[in-house]
Image (cartoon, rainbow, N blue to C red):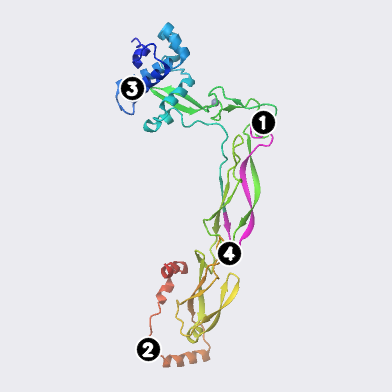
């Protein structure tokens, strides 16, 4: 089967300029693109044919060879789709810029995935567990951060002293090779430079050509008082070093605060259950409440019921942004003595005789549930 004339394929005359060639090809490529003609073999062939014609006519040198010698003059370059010059595909991506999103050409031709140039270093994450007390008072702690740093010997270039990294000759620095697979042009990372676009003839001894080395760094982290689980501290410039002198990433320290056995935190407020002797609940009196900074006297009025709440202002957690303190909510629980002396028993029996038989429900069935669940029930 004889090949069609390339000008004929694109529907242009022999005097067509570059712009006309481009726009003719663009029209044909859109018309015959496989995405628009699924399963249509004729369209596939037409698409291939147009691509081949364009590959030759868009290149001044190849075009002049073709003009003089016909298909024979460019046989090697545009034959069965093998051995396409990658520079031609740079033109392809140019043609399809703006269409890429509609047809996925951008990815197909690697137009949007160009690599190389300085890149910002990666951000790092470090999970830090602290005690409840540390979160309340604030703390300073030292953490060990493994990170990749720019090699000092080669200043990150990866090349031995006195030498330089060279632009990769295979991919001409783009880090990608494009090749024809059937009617598709596929980009894949250049194996010669492993996608970096650079080759190093004599690698730096210290980093073995990587330009980066893994280091463990000790960092002092200041934890502000009032920090809560899930909050993170950003340490500027403590992430990984960028490539080729790109900016350094940041380190995010994500804080996890251990639960406290007595206090439960909700926002900046604290909740606790306080067991109060039943005679104090009945008669009223003073009890000591543990707070973050020592015990505090709490007045319990006579006739206090189990589950009653008392608010101790300003005895909650410090606000992490420095806006004062939350409150401490104390929930009254009644302490019933397990063992009674003979005398105590007599007194209570005497008391019982004076009490009416019917008692009010005191919601004690709620006491079956663990405290942290009940906090939600009580306070929403
Ligand atoms: Zn090095
Ligand atoms: Zn390469």
* Quarter of the image where one finds residue 123: top right
Q: Quadrant of the N terminus?
A: top left
User: Which residue does the numbered mark 3 point to in the structure image?
Assistant: 44
Q: Which residues are magenta?
A: 128-157
- Secondary structure of residue under mark 2: loop
- Secondary structure of residue under mark 3: helix
CB atoms at circles 4 and 2 under 8 Å apart?
no
User: Which residue does the numbered mark 2 point to in the structure image?
Assistant: 357
Q: In the displayed structure, would residue 206 be above or below residue 22?
A: below
Q: Disc 3 or 4, which lies upstream in sequence?
A: 3
Tell me the number on the disc at residue 136.
4
- Mark 1 CB near ligand 1 (8 Å cut): yes
Q: CA distance from mark 1 to mark 2?
A: 92 Å
Residue 314, image x, y percentages:
55, 70
Residue 275, image x, y percentages:
51, 77
User: Which residue does the numbered mark 1 point to in the structure image?
Assistant: 204
Graded by Cα atoms within 10 Å as few (under 14), some (14 to 19) or many (20 or more), the crowding at tag 3 reads many
């Amino acid at each position: 089967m004889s090949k069609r004339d390339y000008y004929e394929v694109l529907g242009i005359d022999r005097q067509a300029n570059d712009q006309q060639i481009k726009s003719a090809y663009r029209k044909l490529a859109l018309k015959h693109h496989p995405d628009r003609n699924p399963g249509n073999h004729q369209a596939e062939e037409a698409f291939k044919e147009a691509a081949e014609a364009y590959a030759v006519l868009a290149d001044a040198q190849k075009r002049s060879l073709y003009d003089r010698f016909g298909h024979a003059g460019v046989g090697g370059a545009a034959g069965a789709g093998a051995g396409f010059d990658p520079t031609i595909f740079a033109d392809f991506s140019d043609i399809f810029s703006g269409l890429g999103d509609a047809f996925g050409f951008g990815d197909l031709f690697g137009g949007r995935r160009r690599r190389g140039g300085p890149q910002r270093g990666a951000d790092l994450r470090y999970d830090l567990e602290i005690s409840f007390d540390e979160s309340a008072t604030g703390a300073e702690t030292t953490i060990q951060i493994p990170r990749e740093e720019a090699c000092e010997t080669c200043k990150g270039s990866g090349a031995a002293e006195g030498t330089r990294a060279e632009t990769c000759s295979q991919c001409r620095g783009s880090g990608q090779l494009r090749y024809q697979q059937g009617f598709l042009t596929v980009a894949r990372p250049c194996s010669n430079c492993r996608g970096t676009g650079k080759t190093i003839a004599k690698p730096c001894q210290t980093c073995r050509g990587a330009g980066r080395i893994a280091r463990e760094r000790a960092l002092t982290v200041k934890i502000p008082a009032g920090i809560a689980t899930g909050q993170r501290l950003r340490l500027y410039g403590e992430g990984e070093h960028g490539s080729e002198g790109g900016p350094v990433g940041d380190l995010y320290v994500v804080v996890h605060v251990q639960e406290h056995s007595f206090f439960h935190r909700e926002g900046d407020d604290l909740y606790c259950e306080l067991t109060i002797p039943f005679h104090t609940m009945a008669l009223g009196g003073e009890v000591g409440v543990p707070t973050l900074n020592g015990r505090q006297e709490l007045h319990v009025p006579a006739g206090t019921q189990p589950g009653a709440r008392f608010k101790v202002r300003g005895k909650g957690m410090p606000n992490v942004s420095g806006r004062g303190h939350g409150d401490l909510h104390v929930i009254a629980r009644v302490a019933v003595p397990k063992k009674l002396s003979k005398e105590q028993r007599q007194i209570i029996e005497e008391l019982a005789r004076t009490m009416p038989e019917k008692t009010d429900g005191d919601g004690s069935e709620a006491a079956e549930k663990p405290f942290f669940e009940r906090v939600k029930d009580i306070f929403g």
